[in-house]
Image (cartoon, grey):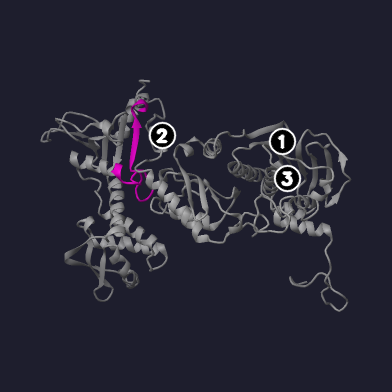
Amino acid sequence: MTLHTPKIADASGRPVIRQLDEAAINRIAAGEVVERPASAVKELVENALDAGASRIAIDYTDGGKTLIRVTDDGCGMTAADLPLALSRHATSKIDGSDLLNIRSFGFRGEALPSLGAVGRLTLTSRAAGQDAAQITCHGSRLSPVKPAALTRGTVVELRDLFHATPARLKFLRTDRAEAQAIHEVVKRLAMAEPTVGFTLSEIGADGPRTLLRLDPEQGDLFDALHRRLTRLIGADFTANALRIEAERDGLALLGYAALPTYSRGSSAQQYLFVNGRPATDRLLLGALRAAYFDFLSRDRHPAAVLNLIVDPERVDVNVHPAKAEVRFREPDAARSLIITALRTALSGAGHRASTTVASETLAAFRPEGPRPAQATLAQAFAFQSPAPAPGFAPGFAEAPAARVALADPVPQAPEPAAQHPLGAARAQLHENWIVAQTADGIVIVDQHAAHERLVYERLKRQLAETGIARQPLLIPEIVTLSPSDAALILSAAPALAEAGLVVEPFGGSAVALTETPAILGPVNGAALLRDILDELAEGGHSALTRARIDAVLSRMACHGSVRSGRQMRPEEMNALLREMEATPGSGQCNHGRPTYVELKLADIEKLFGRR
């Protein structure tokens, strides 16, 4: 039999159209709504939230394959409601007159009958002023309603998921993987509803084991969300997250977004919601990525928890049965709000870098074995102070692997450290690390990374305000490229000219670099062009959008920044520190790495056992 041969046909072989029975319909619907145990948990918890629950308990066994039980203290249902709740397309969420104005998690009326079609479902509930009642549904067959014992709310117990469709069981992952998926679903819903308490437990042979316990959070929205996120993601996230609160064109964006130096190696800490509904929308994820474009390299990902509030009539949540996808009536407005709100917050953070940078640095200083902390600290700085070698000027000390230039060997009136957040420069180590003294600690600055960021921000400012000032080369630099590279760089020549770089054809596959941005000073033209070619190739097209121009400016900034290995005078180092303090985003380089590390005096004293 071929793949497309109809299973049901008459004597002549003609396909016969027939009505499927209710059980088959429910099993098909369940395949769309319930993909795995975590899908069942999501539907049941959302029902509890729609019922106004203030506390929800989720129990499971064997990754949810054997048992899923959700208990809530919501409004409950009457005995007469129970059979109706288990019939398809029966819901209390909407009346069917307006499918665009949906203000609840559920509205299809498919979850409970779908679960009853593929598992053994027991529904126990009690409404205020009514007696508790119970009904069961096995393979879409309902039992008579009977009295039950329950104080309030609803208990939904689902056993032997997919027992009616055993083939589906083969597609499930290990119990551990399914349990992790359940945990992730509960975590996302707990973020969406910080004023609701959640308890997640695994029931094993030794009894229940509580995996997550979250009490309802008090206070205003941001305070409650901040405490909930501290519990769910960790104190490192909330300590380094910026409060996001923006509104425009009838849209609002609320939540927290982390500093770029708190970036992750994957998108695991990106939690996006639309009207409190967890969403995996490509438009939202793309907007989040675009907002951090200037701050992170391609292999790093921002961390954020954001809720986009939009009039329900301006967003369609009825795109897919699982309701994870949404469709905006005005997608550009949603994207613009996210990008603008996040960039404004990041700009307002100024030179701030995440606290995890300091904690990771301190961890690197701590000894791994029995060595004393003092030795570890000295090795971390690669700094020793033997007697000056012959011929060395005062103020310099020579170590086997380090050279330290004191910022002011004979200080007359050193710059006060307490007046500035990044302190006053006191030394330069290895001709790359500026050491500054602050009011309560020290700051170590990567001079090349910091200056690279400052040059980049200057280039962007010039481009936006007056255009990038260019300097003609006295003698054009001729660069020979491959034919394809020459064609690529010349196709982008108009946009490159806007960015301060003038490139002209010079015959064959050679190009002439005739003007460069004045801010860069003398540059290696061939190296600069090849760097820009890499950026154009990574972008996948020759047409330069504004985002790609910014990426080119970032590459150019590297060529115009203070290089590692260059000695800096005290006034130069202090000028760099002051410009960092005045420049938004200067806490990280163009690739998302920190430009400085701040160590508090109390932490340094701990390293030496003085506290």
- Looking at the image, which residue sits at the far left? 391
- The quadrant in which residue 159 appears is top right
Q: Earlier in the sequence, mark 2 or mark 3?
A: 3
- Can you identify the residue that label 2 sits on? 359
Crowding around mark 1 (Cα neighbors within 10 Å: few <14, some 14 to 19, many 20+) is: some
Q: What are the residue bounds of the magenta stretch?
A: 580-603
Q: Which mark is residue 65?
A: 3
Name the quarter where the C terminus is drawn: top left
Which of the pair 287/196 is nearer the observer?
A: 196
- How far is disc 2 from disc 3 in space, using C-alphas? 41 Å
Which of the pair 437/535 is nearer the observer?
A: 437
- How far is disc 3 from disc 1 in space, using C-alphas? 12 Å
Could you tell me if the residues under marks 3 and 1 are in contact, i.e. CB atoms within 8 Å?
no
Q: Which of marks 1 and 2 is nearer the N terminus?
A: 1
- Can you identify the residue that label 1 sits on? 203
Q: Is mark 1 on a helix, strand or loop?
A: strand
